[in-house]
Structure formats: C-alpha cells, structure tokens
Image: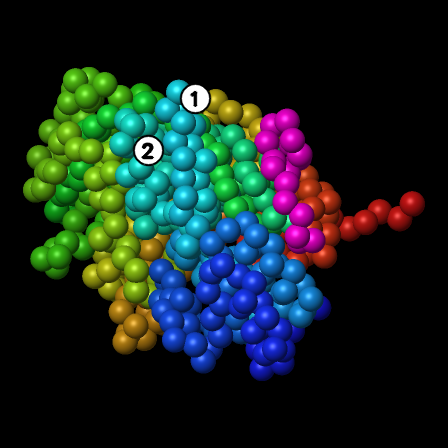
C-alpha cells in the first residue's frame, strides 16, 4: 500500500506543503534533517523521506493529508523515547510533534491540557509550580504522549493509578483528517482504546489529565555491594508486600560511575512527608547500604533520578516481562545473570506495581494489567563502537531464564522492534476489542508504524 522510496516523492508537492505548514518541513538535503531524525535509542538509524515538524493541529492535518495523497507510510514522533524506534520510518513521512509544547493548568479543577511534544520533565516543572502532579514516567526525558497512550507506569502509580487512569480526554486527528475529542462521554470506545492501545487509532494532538496535590517527596537510592543482591531481593520482596499506596520501590542492578557494580533499591514516597521518613526507614536500615541518598526532595528531582542511567545517544536493546512472583529461585536467577552483564551501561530493573492500578477492572482501559506484580526489564545498553552481539545476547538469555516466573504479559511501551509477535500478549482478553476499534477508526491501517493492532476483519453480511 505504501511507497517507501523517498526519491519518488513529488518535490513540487513538498515545496507546496512547506508553504502551508507553520512548522518546518525537512527533507534529507535540508539543514537540520539529521538532528531531527535522532532519537533516544541510537541503535535506530532510519531516514524518513520528509519530516513535518508540526506546531499545531492544523499542521498535523495537512501532514496526514499529504502522506495519504502521496501514498507515504506515516510514523509519529513525540518524545522519541520508544525503545523500538517507532518514531521514525524509512522513506515515508515522520510527523514530528515535538514542537507542540503548550499546556494550561486549571488549578481549581485540578486538570491540565497538554500538547504531545512535552516531555515529563517539562510537564512536571509546570504542574509543580502549583503543587500538582500526575503519574508520569520514571525518566524525565520521556514524552508524555507515548508513555500515556501505552499505559503509563511511574512513581505515583500506587497512589494515583497509571497515566491512563488519569487521562480525562484526548483530541485526535484521524486518518481522514477529521479531528474528534474522545472521552468517557464522546467516542467512549476510542477513549477506551487510547488508554493503552498506543498510536494505533490516530494522532493525539492534546491530552487532558487529572492532577493531584503533591509537594516534596522522600526519594532516593540505597545501594549495596553486589554480593548482597540475593539477600537484598529477599528483603525487597518482603518490604513491598505491604507497601502503602504512597510508596513505590524498584530494585536494580547497575554500575556506578566508579565502575563498581551494585545492587540497589530506588524509592519514592508521595504521601505526608512526616510519615515518609518513618516509612522509608527500614529500607535505609537494611544492610546497611554503602550509599544512601534518600531524603526529602522536589518531585521534579525524583522524576529525573534515573535519567543518567538511560541517557540519549546510547545503543539499547531491552527485554521485559511481568512476573507472577519474585521468589528465592527467581532472585538467584537474577543474581546469576547480573554477574554476566556485558556493559557498564547495562542494568536490570524490577518494578513493583501495587495500589491504585490494581483496584481498576482489567477491562476498564485497554491497558489491562491490573493485578499486583513485579515488572522485570533486562536493559542492554552500550556505546555505538561496540559489537552489539554480546549485549543483545545477554538481554535475551536473561529474559529467557526468567520465563518460569513470567505472567506472560508484557508492557507495550517497551516492546522491542523484534517483538511484534508479543503484541497480543500486551493486551490479553482486551485485544479483540482493540481490533474492532481499530477497524472503526483506522480501517486501512494508515497508522501502523507502532506496535500494530491490525483492524478486525470485516464480517460478510
């Protein structure tokens, strides 16, 4: 259906589109093109035929119309943080939303309307001016739109729910250029699908979120010698088993700038600061740790704690699964593979999901992973000069070894480029309904450069 050869794009038509866009339109010969196609995962190297840097809904509509008229595949870029590099396509049109950064906070209603080019760092800085926040990603450079549409795991989820649980409405440009607003009352089927189904149904040009009162948080990292990993994971499992909603704790294996590999726990307490000191005290007392940075800090600082571990510009390959349990045998498996890490930039992350998300029915949103669980991620990261083979192999072998504890569910936001066969696994029983919504709103699968949900087959009458 789509033409992937940028050399056949009508240059006169490109020139005409350039005059109609408020934002820039870049082709491979334009200054700024290479910078515009750089994304977080440097392993991805794709060359769109045109990049439309949209500044408004009207720009998006014009770009979609152009791509449809000229039979170009479309990719959609927000923050450019997707592990699979789905922000870019080869030869077609990348609709770049990163210039769209307007946001308006309604302090009385405790809501915010935000455009999809914002990162969580930018979003949080603005909402925190008013002592407000909502669940965002654990890395501040992540775009708000991609993370939200894929589910939205973050530090506030135990107290406030996933990002999708705080989405109130979304403005969407459809494949035919129409713009509609989806909410609980308007196009509720689309609104249900957007909350977890990603960019499959259209291009979201603004998102309205519910906000929550939030001041300083107790947050930081406690690190232990790597020889303490198994005992730390045992403590971690027991500690989070009765964690209150306000406390989110993740476990990790990482390498410090000194070159020392450590076992670590990273915590954020988002409740009463006085209560927070008491709640995190056992975490700080275990060991004792060789590093303890837990203290009252601004929420925006907590949101950027992991930024240095996963910066822009490195090559990345991730494998992940939700785990049914983190028992002693699972912890021993983590220890065995942590000992084989192939790069000082690679790490293992185990996230604990509990509280508010687990009190929502599995079919309330497309993102239906609603039981308490651990989320395991093997993060292979390396410099571009390295041979990728040993790093990728480490992540794959680690993931395979953890499968006896897998819940056979996966977080769509961090599926890799080679994991298209796991898309149905991300949605479970919600997948069939998503395919029906896809058929209704994007029957030709125009928006397919994503973790794609194919339109349901039309039933003959």
Magenta residue span: 175-190
Where residue 245 sits in the image (x, y, percent)? Answer: 34, 23
Where residue 184 sits in the image (x, y, percent)? Answer: 60, 28
The CA distance from mark 2 to mark 1 is 13 Å
Q: Is residue 435 above or below residue 276?
A: below
Name the disc covering residue 109, or none: 1
Mark 2: few, some, or many residues within 10 Å (few <14, many ≥20)?
Answer: many
The image's colouring method is: rainbow
Q: Quadrant of the N terminus?
A: bottom right
The quarter holding residue 132 reads top left
The quarter holding residue 432 reads top right
Where residue 166 sits in the image (x, y, percent)? Answer: 46, 30
Where residue 254 sits in the image (x, y, percent)? Answer: 21, 52
Q: Nearer the viewer, residue 401 or 208?
A: 208
Q: Nearer the viewer, residue 279 or 63?
A: 63
Q: Is residue 130 left or right of residue 146?
A: left
Name the disc covering residue 127, or none: 2
Res. 433 in view: yes
Which residue occupies 32% across, 44% down?
122
């Amino acid at each position: 259906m789509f033409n992937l050869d940028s050399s056949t794009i009508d240059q006169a038509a490109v020139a005409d589109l350039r005059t109609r866009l408020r934002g820039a339109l870049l082709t491979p010969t334009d200054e700024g093109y290479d910078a515009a196609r750089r994304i977080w995962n440097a392993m991805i190297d794709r060359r769109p035929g045109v990049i439309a840097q949209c500044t408004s809904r009207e720009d998006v509509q014009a770009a979609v119309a152009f791509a449809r008229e000229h039979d170009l595949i479309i990719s959609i870029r927000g923050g450019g943080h997707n592990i699979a590099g789905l922000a870019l396509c080869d030869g077609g049109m990348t609709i770049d939303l990163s210039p769209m950064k307007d946001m308006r906070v309604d302090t009385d209603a405790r809501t915010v309307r935000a455009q999809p080019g914002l990162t969580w760092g930018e979003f949080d800085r603005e909402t925190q001016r008013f002592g407000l926040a909502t669940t965002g990603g654990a890395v501040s450079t992540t775009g708000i739109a991609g993370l939200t549409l894929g589910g939205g795991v973050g530090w506030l989820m135990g107290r406030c729910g996933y990002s999708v649980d705080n989405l109130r409405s979304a403005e969407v440009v459809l494949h035919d250029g129409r713009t509609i607003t989806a909410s609980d009352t308007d196009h509720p089927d689309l609104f249900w699908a957007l909350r977890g189904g990603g960019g499959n149904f259209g291009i979201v040009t603004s998102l309205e979120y519910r906000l929550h009162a939030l001041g300083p948080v107790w947050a930081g990292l406690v690190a232990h010698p790597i020889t303490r990993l198994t005992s730390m994971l045992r403590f971690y499992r027991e500690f989070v088993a009765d964690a209150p909603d306000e406390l989110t704790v993740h476990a990790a294996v990482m390498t410090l700038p000194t070159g020392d590999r450590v076992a670590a726990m990273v915590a954020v307490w988002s409740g009463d600061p006085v209560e927070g000191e008491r709640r995190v005290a056992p975490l700080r007392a275990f060991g004792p740790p060789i590093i303890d940075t837990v203290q009252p800090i601004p929420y925006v600082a907590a949101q950027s704690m992991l930024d240095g571990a996963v910066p822009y510009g490195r090559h990345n390959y991730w494998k992940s699964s939700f785990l049914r349990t983190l028992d002693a045998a699972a912890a021993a498996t983590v220890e065995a593979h942590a000992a084989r890490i192939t790069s000082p930039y690679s790490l293992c992350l185990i996230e604990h999901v509990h509280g508010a998300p687990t009190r929502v029915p599995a079919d309330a949103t497309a993102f239906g992973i609603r039981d308490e669980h651990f989320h395991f991620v093997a993060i292979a990261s390396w410099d571009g000069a390295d041979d990728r083979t040993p790093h990728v192999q480490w992540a794959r072998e680690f993931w395979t070894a953890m499968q006896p504890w897998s819940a056979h569910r996966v977080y769509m936001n961090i599926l890799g480029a080679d994991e298209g066969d796991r898309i149905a696994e991300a949605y479970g029983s919600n997948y069939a309904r998503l395919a029906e919504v896809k058929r209704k709103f994007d029957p030709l699968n125009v928006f397919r450069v994503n973790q794609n949900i194919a339109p349901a087959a039309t039933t003959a009458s």
